[in-house]
Structure formats: C-alpha cells, structure tokens
Amino acid sequence: QVQLVESGGGLVQAGDSLRLSCVASGGTFYPISMGWFRQAPGKEREFVASVTWGGGKTKYGNSVKGRFTISRDNAKNTQFLQMNALNSEDTGIYYCVAWTAVTAGPASWGPGTQVTVSS
C-alpha cells in the first residue's frame, strides 16, 4: 500500500513563495502521473497541477498557470510544487495525489498540508 505524505505548507504573506514536497513510500511505486489538488474553505476541491512520471509532461489549473511549477524526482519517489506570487486565493489544504490509470481519478491521496496566504 503506497502512502503519500506532503510537507512544506505554512503561513506566508501575499507575494511570497512556498515549496511543497510529497514523498511516496510503502511499496513498489510507479504511477502514471502525480499531482496536486487543493481545497479552500467552503469551496470544491480544485485541480492544481500534474506531471507524468515517465516523460515529465506537466498540466496546470488555470488559476495557477505561470505562478506554480510542478516537478518530480523519480529516484526519490518525490514530487514538488513550487508556488510563487502567492495570493489569498491560494489558501487551502493541498493534497498530493497519484494516478495509476489514465482514465480514472487519483488512486492515492496524501493527508494534505495547509497553506495560508495572508493579504
């Protein structure tokens, strides 16, 4: 059973940067893609970014394009989310996810890490 654990969340001011990490452990790990979702208070869960594990192809949600960068380190079963120019709309719980099938939703979710951006 693969486990995903996020780290790097915290409280920052608008305009600051933050880097999230997610490590996968607990078994043989070769997902199709890894990525991030987030959920703000009172809002639906939102897709943030994803990266294919093999080719490194990236996708981003419209609200973070140009500000966030996703990357991965296959050797360490780790992915990262570099978040720049943060604003209050980026506040929420950020979840690390992994896909094991192209047509299905994420197969694994981390417990989440809180990001709070003060204006």
Image (spheres, rainbow, N blue to C red):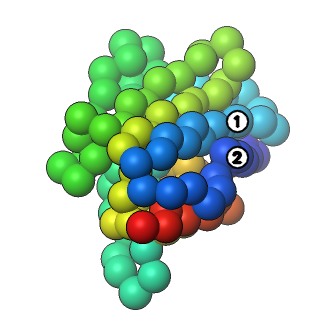
Residue 75 in view, yes or no: yes
Label 2: which secondary element: strand
Question: Residue 78 shows which numbered tag?
Answer: none
> What residue appears at the point 66 percent right and 25 percent down from the top-left corner?
77
Q: Which of these two is toward me, 34 or 29?
A: 34
| Residue receiving disc 2 | 7
Residue 35 in view, yes or no: no
> What residue appears at the point 62 percent right and 60 percent down from the top-left corner?
11
Question: Residue 23 shows which numbered tag?
Answer: 1
Q: Which of these two is toward me, 74 or 112?
A: 112
Q: Badges 1 and 2: C-beta atoms under 8 Å apart?
A: yes
Name the residue furthest bottom: 42
Q: Is residue 28 left or right of residue 47?
A: right
Q: For the residue marked with disc 1, what is the amino acid?
A: Val
Quarter of the image containing the C terminus?
bottom left
Quarter of image, res 21: top right
Which numbered disc, 1 or 2, marks the residue closer to the eye? 2
> What residue appears at the point 24 percent right and 35 percent down from the top-left corner?
66
Q: Which of these two is toward me, 84 or 6?
A: 84
Residue 101 image offset from top left, x and y in percent: 40, 40
Figure check: 79 above or below 63: above
Label 1: which secondary element: strand
